[in-house]
Image (cartoon, rainbow, N blue to C red):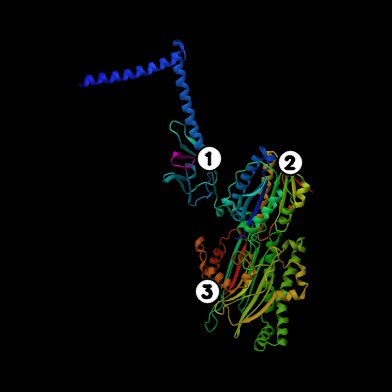
Amino acid sequence: MRKLPVYILLDTSGSMYGEPIEAVKNGLQVLTSTLTSDPYALETAYLSVITFDSTAKQAVPLTEIAAFQPPQLKASGCTALGEALQLVAQCADQEVIKTTPEKKGDWKPLVFIMTDGEPTDDIRKGLEDFKSRKWGMVVACAAGAGANTNTLKQITENVVSLDTADSATIRQFFKWVSASVQANSVKVDEGKGEINSIGELPPPPPEVNIVI
Amino acid sequence: MNREQRLVARRNAADSRIKDFLDAFEEAADRLSIPCSERRRFLGWTIENLWNKHIEERMNRRLVIENEINNLGLRIPNGTVRKAYTASFALPADKVKDVAIDGLEETGLTLSQPAEGEYLISGTPQKHGDFTLTVSYSTVEGEPRSSFKLPVAFNPDPRSIWRDLRSRLHKDGVKPDWATEYIMVKEDAEGAPRKDVIAASIQGRSHAHEERPRDDYFAARHYEDSDWYVVAVADGAGSAPLSWKGSEIACDTIIEHCRENLDGNKVFEEAIAAFHADPNTELRSVLTAQVSNIIYKGAVKAHEAINAEAAAQGEKPRDYATTLMFAICKHFSFGWFIASFWVGDGAMCIYDEKGGSAKLLGTPDEGEFSGQTRFITMREIFHDKDLVAKRMRMTIVPDFTALFLMTDGVSDPLFETDNNLNDFNKWKEFYSLLKEGFPEDGIPGVNLTDDNPEAAGELLEWLKFWRPGNHDDRTMVVVK
């Protein structure tokens, strides 16, 4: 069966300490409970969580929705976004099945990146690795005023911003992520391929602004 | 010494120990110049302090254990409703006793202790949702019980959350959500069995979940007089709002067109016989022209019929977007003549089990990305003459096991790739799957014996097979 991989890259640097990180944990809970009650997503979507602070690590390997458990998150350290981009490329190489003449591989992975600050490492190497792989929709989210949308625009044209990184706003973002994964799993079930433009995603809530 | 004397002696010994103790206490108090009036209060203070210290130590021992347990970060896997569930965990038996779990009862699970320090949660979850279990345990005697939270999630069975909604078109009697047909063709004059047609089409689970109509359609005929079979299958594009109608128009147009052109068409049949007797270039082009007249013109008519309907309704033809595959076939003394046309995805194949061949009647239209298929409603498919020729096929075979036409709702989950569609062994697997069904899901196979009208209903049931992530409409026509 062809899975729809979803990689979620979360900034767990020190600036996320307190309300933001709690909101992110909550958000992951919202995401899982929404997706487990949707027959399309429950059958096709697979989730992985990659966190980045002073280093990047894969907190949850690519796991089917039914078995997914939100990881324990702690906020501390810097913002190694470049390393996270490099890591997600490596993870996808190992976890996403390629199409062969005999077998249709997985759908192209969806990537959601959420950060509240400037990267503290050099993102060029990671960006190069990331860009050399095939992705489905890549959405980068600048949470609060501290994140630089221009940096995120280098990663993907699909950048959204949250005015504040409070729990209500972050929750809305995760609801939108859930709806986007749902929409994509419906589309692939129909054999109509992955979603490729932000216009095909459900319209974001007022708290989530599309950066043009 | 008698008993009395022994008691007295013992009491005296105890008294003298107490006296010794008091003497020692008094001596120390004298040395420290503790005033006599303070000595009783001092003794009380000392006991209280030591007692507190004792309590604190006990509590610290409990906290150390609690910390150790919490640091284990125990997690148990998620489960599925109405599926047997087991999860086990271990706690250090020398530190943790009398383990109990609160909140387990409402999940339908129980706790057991298969060995010292090992715990097993088992049973069948009854409700889906996120639950928080509280695991409590005793540590140090005299200390209150400790506990930690253990979250667990039970997911619904994916199959149980598909909704089964009749589409509006079904409710209005416009287009049912399923269809079956069995065309029984009786033995010929010599009593030799002739091929029957089994067909079924069903609304996909994804369409039923969202109250959307069945976009697939099929039409099949056997013309008694001419003995021609005509079978057509179409899959309306999910994104086109009227594609359910487009697929109907396409198939029905083909049936009508073929009836008109095959009935009493001696010229065509003579061209087939002549080509078979002497397959030279000249006779081939004569026959090709005849085939084009029927097959290619049929496709053009289907395209035009949709345009006409769109114009009549004030809609755009692309809103009727549909794939289309159809075949005509007839048995001659020298074998079967089959001609076909195919635009879009799905699969159309002449399967010959004895001969060990599976001849795909074209190439499914799929781009690099799935979903970029072609539709009969697209004008450009008629522009390139070479491409048009590639969409047409004609062949003469001595016999065949079955001629299959199916939409991608069937071929995608069971074949996956174009390579597999060209692989005889994959077709062999497919054929036995059709006969044997999916026992693991309680779906029986189709009884393909001759003259068995039940087979159409069986095919409809068979089309309900489960493949995660594949819930499109499914349609299949079998000439066998």
Which contiguous range is marked in magenta?
B91-104
- Asked if labels 2 and 1 share a chain, the reply is no
Q: Are marks 2 and 3 in contact (CB under 8 Å)?
A: no
Evaluate whether residue B65 shows in this view: yes
Q: Which residue is mark 3?
A: B451
Determine the image quadrant of residue B253.
Answer: bottom right
- Residue extending farthest to the left is B2
Q: Does B97 appear in magenta?
A: yes
Mark sitting on residue B332: none
Q: Which residue is mark 1?
A: B70
**Depth check, front residue: B310 or B112:** B112
Q: Residue at x 60, y 60 (%)?
A: A1
Measure the C-alpha gap from mark 3 to mark 1.
70 Å
Q: Are marks 2 and 1 in contact (CB under 8 Å)?
A: no
Q: Residue A7: x and y, percent?
A: 66, 52
Q: Amino acid at mark 1?
A: Asn
Determine crowd level at label 3: few under 14, some 14-19, many 20+ residues with C-alpha closer than 10 A.
some
Q: Could you tell whether B58 is left or right of A91 in the image? A: left
Q: Which residue is mark 2?
A: A144
